[in-house]
């Protein structure tokens, strides 16, 4: 099931949101060892998880988390401009039609074959959300290996500055253009997934 969550969080079931925050803790804190806040020892929640955040969540019908991503409006403080602006050669892009993709999370319980399918569905949902909501660009921060995968998805993507080392990781700020040909580009790269996901 696909859930697109804008403010307010209701009527999305609490089980779906809780499962997402728990999965984020499992991936970003337990696996990747990020030094970020954890609520009640179970949920990864930070200052950007507020009423302005949007969430794209893939789940099983019972609420079990499969994958998710958080979208932040760039007209408000977000991760790139607040903490990583130095990764950009120019001021980080801002605008009502520009959102930041953060916390791209695939559940750790997925098998390898499932991960690819779920990843493709999440990328498809992110692109379709942009086209349906007049989002012209996404920005994001990625480690170099992940950035290379993002480039291979086929959409128009470019770095916003030279890669830089940060706490042992080579990071890149990036920009993804959303246009009329985006879904065709994803399809040509074998990423676009037309499977019905609506909740």
Image (cartoon, rainbow, N blue to C red):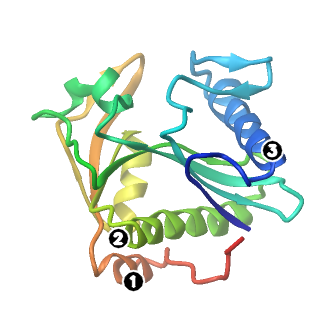
Q: What residue would you read off at disc 3?
A: 14
Q: Secondary structure under badge 3? A: helix
- Alpha carbon distance from label 1 to label 2: 7 Å
The reply to whether the C-beta atoms of the residues labelled 1 and 2 are less than 8 Å apart is yes
Residue 73: give x, y in percent of width and height: 37, 43
Q: What residue would you read off at disc 1?
A: 188
- Alpha carbon distance from label 1 to label 3: 37 Å
Residues 59 and 148: in front is 59
* Residue ID at (74%, 54%): 11
Q: Secondary structure under badge 1? A: helix
| Residue 142 placement: quadrant | top left
How many other residues sit within 10 Å of disc 2, few (<14), some (14-19) or many (≥20)? some
Outermost residue to the right? 62
Give above or below for 96 relative to 172.
Answer: below
Question: Which callout, 3 or 2, points to the residue nearer the camera?
Answer: 3
- Alpha carbon distance from label 3 to label 2: 35 Å
Residues 2 and 7: in front is 7
Give above or below for 196 relative to 155.
Answer: below
Residue 167: give x, y in percent of width and height: 41, 16
Q: What residue would you read off at disc 2?
A: 154
């Amino acid at each position: 099931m696909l859930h697109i969550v804008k403010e307010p969080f209701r009527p999305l079931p609490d089980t779906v949101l809780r499962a997402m925050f728990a999965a984020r803790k499992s991936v970003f804190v337990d696996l990747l060892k990020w030094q970020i806040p954890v609520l009640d020892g179970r949920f990864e929640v930070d200052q950007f998880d507020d009423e302005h955040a949007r969430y794209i969540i893939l789940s099983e019908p019972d609420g079990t988390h499969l994958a998710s991503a958080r979208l932040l409006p760039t007209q408000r403080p977000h991760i790139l401009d607040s903490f990583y602006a130095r990764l950009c050669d120019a001021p980080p892009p801002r605008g009502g039609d520009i959102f930041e993709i953060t916390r791209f999370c695939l559940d750790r319980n997925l098998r390898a074959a499932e991960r690819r399918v779920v990843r493709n569905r999440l990328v498809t949902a992110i692109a379709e959300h942009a086209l349906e909501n007049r989002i012209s660009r996404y920005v994001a921060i990625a480690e170099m290996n992940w950035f290379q995968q993002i480039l291979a998805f086929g959409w128009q993507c470019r770095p916003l500055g030279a890669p830089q080392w940060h706490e042992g990781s080579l990071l890149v700020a990036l920009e993804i253009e959303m246009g009329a040909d985006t879904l065709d580009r994803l399809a040509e790269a074998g990423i676009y997934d037309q499977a019905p996901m609506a909740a």
